[in-house]
Amino acid sequence: MHVSLRSFQLCTIHLAVALSLCSTGSYAQNDPSIETIEVTAKRQAYRGNFDALKTPEAVSEINQQLIANTGVTGLTQALDLSASVSRQNSLGGLWDSFAIRGFFGDENVPSGYLVNGFNAGRGFSGPRDLSGIERVEVLKGPKAALYGRGEPGGTINLITKQPTFEQQGSIALELGSRDKRRFEADFSGGLTEQTAARVIGFYETGDSFRDTIDINKKGVMASVLFEQSARSVWQYELEAARQEIPFDRGILALGGDFDMMPIERFLGEPGDGPTTTEVLGHQLQWQYELSNDWAVNSGLSYRSTQLTGTSSDAEVSPSRQKLYYNGRTLTRQRRQRDYDTDQFVIRSELAGKFDTGTIAHELIVGIDYDLFDYDRDYRVYRAPALSTNPSNEMLHAIDIYQPVYGQHALPTPVPAIVRVQKQIATGLYLQDQMHLTEDLHVRVGGRIDRLKQTLDDHIRNVSAEQAETHFSPQAGVVYQLSDRWSLYSSYGEGYRLNFGTDANGQGFKPNETTSGEIGTKFNLLDNNLGVTLAYFDSTQKNIIVADAANPGFHTAIGQASSKGIEFDVTGQLPGDIDVWFSYAYIDAQVDKDARDTGLGVALKKGDELLNIPQNSASLQISKQLPVFERPLTLGVGANYVDERLGQRGSDFYLPAYTVANMFAKYDVTQQFEVKLQVHNLFDRTYFPNSYTQIWVQPGEPRSVDITLSYTF
């Protein structure tokens, strides 16, 4: 059955408006057994405090227990647990890159995410470590009506661990395969009767399964909570981290031959050294309870990131790539990056409840300002065309079967892009969820943004400026069939500013997404098990593509669509078995003929989108057992990913795979815990993502980790 996006839009908006204007039904106060609204604790900014059954949207929450059980320490690995999220080009492991519901933003910059509701993921801080993160929220569908610019398929929001007045702490030491060593510490407690603080730190070193590659990262998160009064609460958070990451494009799989070389083989140049990423971030938030029903949330965030390093990776141009002609000599580019970003966000939001006659309202209204400053110095050495008969040294070449590192002098990259770009967005947003009857809820809202973008290109000596006003609506309807079962429909829009200019020096129109959704949510087994089933239909336009009329330039004419079904189950089964299950069927494709920006190949209407599987699923189950009067927790899990397109404009596909894991955790004493974790239990060879046949990322072989932790 196919339900068009236009039908979603008309049905949802018309129904929401008609019901809000015409309803004469009575409203019954919420049963406190169904929904509990916290009025003294810190509120969730941008979202409001809604029972999950009463929200017209699909949300997955990866909580701290699930993160700990699966043993993941990075954001990308945590997002593997949601079948709606798929991996994208991570630029050789330098950042987190993902698609939600088949859509991704700009593949040349990291995927954006929020931290406590603040835009935070657009800089170059390296792959996000989960130390200090309480839970990961996957908010599916475009959310510009509340959050402003963001990823087209949905929003990732990281909720950090908060200070506690109770004195507590923990230390953990993890030892694992390939000489992995990871240390974490977490200390929290009250400083005075009104002030509490928390400090969390991590340090990790080790070798990779990839030749010559090693890991070195460290970071600290610190926060202070000040309860000024019974109604006024202040909180400050600091984030500082540094990672050293060797740039690694992976292996070659020409013609779909994934056995042409060992997955351990590194085809870069160890002499380039690691790429370094750094981040320093600050958040300050203030919540003031005006009354039991109304509160003000205000805050500001400043985040500075830097990425510096040099890399050698496979040349993609057929006119320069010798491998395509002799089958063993790989032409490489040498690239130098020096990226700096500064992001400043400020917001203020009023949230509360009021009645108009028989209709009860839950209102969110706010204003925010977002400044993103991106300073980019990108330099490249590219080999001469093969037609000039260049030497292997000029090709910066390496033998893929018998690699010898450092055999030639490293070439010097020359400036390719040196520019400063600023994006400024000032937004005003409003959301009103109306309880028309005890069972019928309608949500309407929207956001208006004033956008400005400037660009100074120091190579072409040109400057450009772009300004426009953008409106993003949302609407939704929820009908509760019972206190444990609801139906919903929603419509939403999203946008993302596109970097750069066209051949005329003009800025691009924003990348825009429209999406409709229908679904149902229900709770089973005395509310211990939550189930969400959703169908969505989305369209994305103004995707940056190559400008066929002006070689070397781009234009915003690309268009794609994605529709599918999601099924999520989380909670507890009979027998005290904890379960997490996520399944997604996604049909994502090109909607308009275009050309690929990176490879220069034709894209045809109906072509699949890169790295998007049609079917994917994640299952994690665990159970606690008494052993010698102490709890033993056992868990197993598996991720399945269908085959997916591995290079645009081709018939190159990455094979489907299933990766299993298991863990065992035993509380030796009330304070001392030992955990055994096995990833890729059956040592499967798999490939999570790629960009071309010569940039294929292999997955990690089996690894075994032992963690010793002590809490006090």
Image (cartoon, helix red, strand yellow):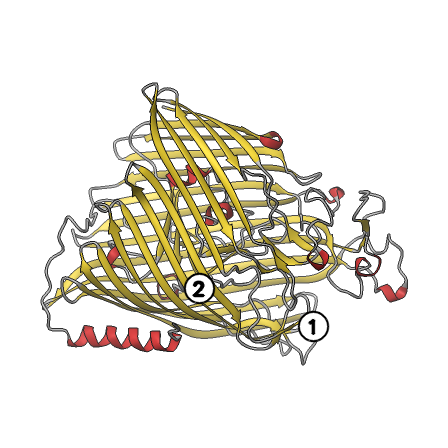
Q: Residues within 10 Å of mark 1 (few under 14, many from 20)?
A: few
Looking at the image, is 578 positioned above or below residue 335? above
Mark number displayed over residue 64: none
Looking at the image, is 31 positioned above or below residue 701? below
> Picture coordinates of residue 674 (x, y %)?
44, 25
> Picture coordinates of residue 667 (x, y %)?
38, 24
Q: Residues within 10 Å of mark 2 (few under 14, many from 20)?
A: many
Q: CA distance from mark 1 to mark 2?
A: 27 Å
**Residue 237 found in image quarter:** top left
Q: For this view, does 247 lie left or right of residue 489?
A: right
The residue furthest bottom is 549
| Residue 264 visible somewhere in the drawing | yes
Q: Quadrant of the N terminus?
A: bottom left
* Front position in the image: 657 or 663: 657
Residue at image mark 1: 552
Looking at the image, is 100 positioned above or below residue 631? below
Q: For this view, does 229 lie left or right of residue 407?
A: left
> Picture coordinates of residue 210 (x, y %)?
67, 41
Q: Residue type at mark 2?
A: Arg
Of helix, strand and loop, which one carries label 2? loop
Q: Quadrant of the C terminus?
A: top left
Of helix, strand and loop, which one carries label 1? loop
> Picture coordinates of residue 528 (x, y %)?
26, 44
Residue at image mark 2: 149
Q: Residue type at mark 1?
A: Gly
* Front position in the image: 97 or 299: 97
Tell whether label 2 touches label 1 (CB within 8 Å): no
* Front position in the image: 614 or 297: 614
